[in-house]
Every structure is written in structure tokens, then in C-alpha cells.
Image: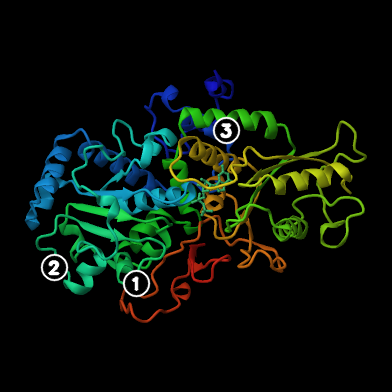
Amino acid sequence: SSIGSSQREPKKDVLLGGLLVPGFDEHSCASRYQAAYYHKDMARRPSPHLIKRLREQEALQRRCGPGTEPYARASQRLKSGQTDAAGDEIDGCRYLVLISYRGLGNRMLAMASAFLYAMLTDRVLLVDRGYGDTLTSLFCEPFPNATWALPHDFPLENFKDLGEDAPESYGNVAVNRSGSVTGLRFVYLHLDHAASQANRLVYCDDHRQFLHRLQWAVLRTDQYMAPGLFFNLAYRDELDRLFPSKDSVFHILSRYLLHPTNDIWGMVTRYYDSYLRNADERVGIQIRVFENRDTPFQQVLDQILACTSQEHLLPAVVGAAGGVSSPAFKAGAAGGGGGGGARSVAVLVTGLSSWYADSIREMYWKSATVTGEAVRVHQPSHEEHQHYFHGEHDMKALAEIYLLSLTDKIVASGWSTFGYAGYGLAGHTPYLLFRPMNYSEPAPNPPCTRAMSMEPCSHGAPGFECTRKEINRNIDTGVLLPHVRPCEDMSWGLKLT
Ligand code: GDP
């Protein structure tokens, strides 16, 4: 089997500088041990403090997780509605339950940032399995001898229906109950990208308020919480120690946490070995059109080609007009004169429609490149429509996100968490396509920009300062901290740099 690749190149640091723990059964999750042979080296090293905290979190997950006595007692308490305030200290085990919803990219950003939140608040992270047990069919267990999957018999009935008006919601407790948790079995953190500012007060919870008094917290988020956590003075020093470079929080946490299962890893490696491995360069283009129209948009293709030309990512073709022509493109080691020795570029296109990749492929078939390079265009799947929690569809999506992370340069669609997850895992600063608000109009100009960092954009960060908590006055929080900036692709989003 391909497990042998790690034996062929014994020098690779497969455990990523101590980020990953040894001791897992290698065959049960091959990606954990083989990814290092496919990925580029990590863009940033994990800090010693992060490594120490990860080991502590793993120990907590083991000591308090499902299958343990403390978990049985805690879930019994939740079930029986026992709410005495001192009780949360029982066994020293507190829990953060993450509800899974929305697309896979959303879920990956949510998992990585919920994990960070769990670590900051000393809670055990338990992830809802999703419909059809998608969690366990997509991802390996990240913690040794522990499970992060929420047990099927989790006692809180209908927890997936919780909404921001729930009596247990943080916004309600903070604003309408003045922080009183009397009679509450759990607190519900509603951090959906569209959450009210009152619910976003979670970002400012400083432990001394009420959250720590509750053993159970249920979190709903479809987005990347990390930038918002930096506004909290209670976490800031710890975050600085965990992440001396703020531009790679998702990169490091996703490489730690999100290992595809063997079936998906097989899809990734077979595709990579067949179509990408032997190219001199791999360019990923992630195409996401936020419109339910069955016919593709010429404007989107124009925008992509204008971007690859502007950024010299793909060679121009002979005789091309206007924006597509790019004689300035320098291929470095261009093969010169074509023939069998020509330098080759493999383009990995991901998207729901096949038309864009077909068009780019045809362009390079009908015309020669000005550099003499051979351009091969590949697209693993074209699912046409988005589905939620559909086994095979999700598997393909994860395989493609992972394949994107194995390319050398990435063009990603603005607003798309699918792309954020791909370039974040890769550790590349992407070229971000500006999202057209109306796809039928001419493409945005400029078409794209080089991003500030490899971090995902948070689509639901707080719009207030934690020192003031003025939730009725939306201020520009993108100017408050040196490492938290407005996103390139969404003016009200925030990203770490
Ligand atoms: P976002 O909506 O672009 O932020 O990304 P999400 O991943 O959260 O949701 C989009 C969903 O649509 C994915 O999870 C897939 O189910 C599907 N999808 C979108 N683009 C692609 C693609 O390029 N390939 C595959 N296989 N699925 C896609």
C-alpha cells in the first residue's frame, strides 16, 4: 500500500515539529503520517507553548471525554437539570459542544476555531457528528485515545434547533438576565456569521463573568472565530504565546486537527500522483459562484483569466487579445521551444461547474503559450449543485479542499470558506478574486489581489470593543489591533495578519 511512502523517505518530519503526537495507529489514519510527503513544509513552526498546550488539551480530552466516568457524570447532570453553581467544578471537566451545519469549508473553519476556543477556556471539545455521521467519515480522531465525536446519546434533546432567542443564549443571559445563570443547564453560544451583536458578546466573556460557571456550553458557528478572540483582554497574552505569528493560526490548527480519513486520503493521493505530482508547478484555482443559475458566467471566466494574467500565474497564449496576453510572464525555468522537455504547469480547478476548466483547457489546446510551457488543466469533480451532509459529495469536497492545499499557488474566490480552508491548510497567501455582487455585470476591476495573509476571513466578528461592549453602536473594529484587519474580500470581515 501507499503507506510505504514514509519508509522511502525516512527523513521527513512527519510529526511537524512536535505539532502531532506519535502513538496513533498509522494504518487507521494514513494522512496523519503521509501528508508531510505531499504538503510543502509548514509555513510557520508551532510555538513551544502551543505544543505544550496541545498536549494538555489532549490529556483533558482523554480524562473527561466520552467513555470516561467524568463524562458520564457530567452528561447525567445535564440530563437531570442539576444546575447548582458549584457543580461545574465536579471532576474539573467542562465541555464545549459544536453544532455542525452549513458547507464543509464553513465546518472546517468552525472546528479549528472552536478548538482554539476550547483550549483557551479549558473545555473539552465535542463535535456534533452531523447528519449521517459525516464527521467520522470525513475526519480522523485528532486526539490520541479519546474521541471528539459527540456521543449519539448526548442528553440535550433538540440542541440543534437552538437559535439566538433561546433563553440559554449568551446574548439573553448577558443582556436580559444581567449574567444570571440561575436555573440554566447550559449556555448557548450563537456565533453564526449573522449573529446579533448581543450574542457576539461571547467574544468578550472574561471568565469572571458567568460562562465559567456552567459545565456545558453549546456553540453554533459556521465561521472562523479566531480574529474575534483577540479582542478579549483575558485571552490576549495567552494567544500571543500560542501564536507569536498571528498570520498562521488556521494553518497550524488545521494541520493539527483536520486529518482526512483513509478513503478520502486515497482520493487525494491517487489524484495527486496521477495529475499533479510530475508537473513543474501546480496552480490551484478555486471557483465559487454564489448564484443558483445552471448556466455559467462568461464574466467569471474573464475575471479568473484577468487575475492569472495580472499576477503572472499562467502563461499567456500566442495571439491572445487584451487582458489575457502577458508577455511579461517569466516562467523561470521555461523549457524553451516546446517539445518533450517543455516546462509543465498543472492547473487544478475546483468548482461545481465544469465549464470554466473546460474553457481554460480549450484555450491552451487551441493556442500555444508564449513561453512554450505545457499547461494541463484538471478538475476532479463537477457536482453542479451544493448538497449538505451528503456522504460522497462531502468526501469529494474534502478531497478537493485537500488537493488545493497541495498546490504551489492558489487563486481563491472571495467570500468562499471552501477556498479559505484550502489555502489555509496549504499555508499559502492566496490571490483572492473579488466577489462580483452581480455576476451578470462586467467582472470586478482589478479582478483579484494578493491577500495579506494565509488566514481565513471571519464573517461574523464583533463590532464593538470589549472594554466598552457598546453593542448598539457598530464601530470599525478593523483598526483596533495591529494584527486584526478588514478582509480583502469582505469589508466588514476581519482577518489575522
Ligand atoms: P462556501 O459556501 O463557498 O463558503 O463553502 P462551503 O464548503 O462551506 O460550502 C459549499 C459546499 O458546496 C461545499 O462544502 C461542497 O459541498 C459544495 N462545493 C462548492 N464548491 C465545490 C467544489 O469546488 N468541489 C466540490 N466537490 N464541492 C463544492
Secondary element at tag 2: loop
Report the Cα–Cα distance between label 2 and label 1: 19 Å
The tag on residue 66 is: none
Residue bearing mark 1 = 197
List the single residue furthest toward the bottom: 473
Q: Residue 20 versus residue 100: which sits nearer the camera? A: 100
The tag on residue 180 is: 2
> Dividing the image into 4 quarters, which one contains the N terminus?
top right
Secondary element at tag 3: helix
245 horizontally vs 300: left or right: left
Q: Residue at x 44, y 28 (%)?
A: 29
Question: How many labels sit on residues?
Answer: 3
Whether ligand 1 has any atom under 8 Å from the Cβ at mark 3 is answered as: no
**Local crowd size for mark 3, using a 10 Å CA cut-off: few (<14), some (14–19), many (≥20):** many
Residue bearing mark 3 = 268
314 horizontally vs 61: left or right: right
Residue 4 % position (x, y):
54, 19
Report the Cα–Cα distance between label 1 and label 3: 40 Å
Query: Would you place residue 330 above or below residue 336 in this image?
Result: below
List the single residue furthest toward the top: 1
Residue 46 in view of the camera = no
Q: Residue 309 versus residue 356: which sits nearer the camera? A: 356
Residue 294 % position (x, y):
63, 52
Instruction: Give the mark nearer the N terminus: 3 vs 2.
Output: 2
Q: Quadrant of residue 68?
A: top left
**Local crowd size for mark 2, using a 10 Å CA cut-off: few (<14), some (14–19), many (≥20):** some
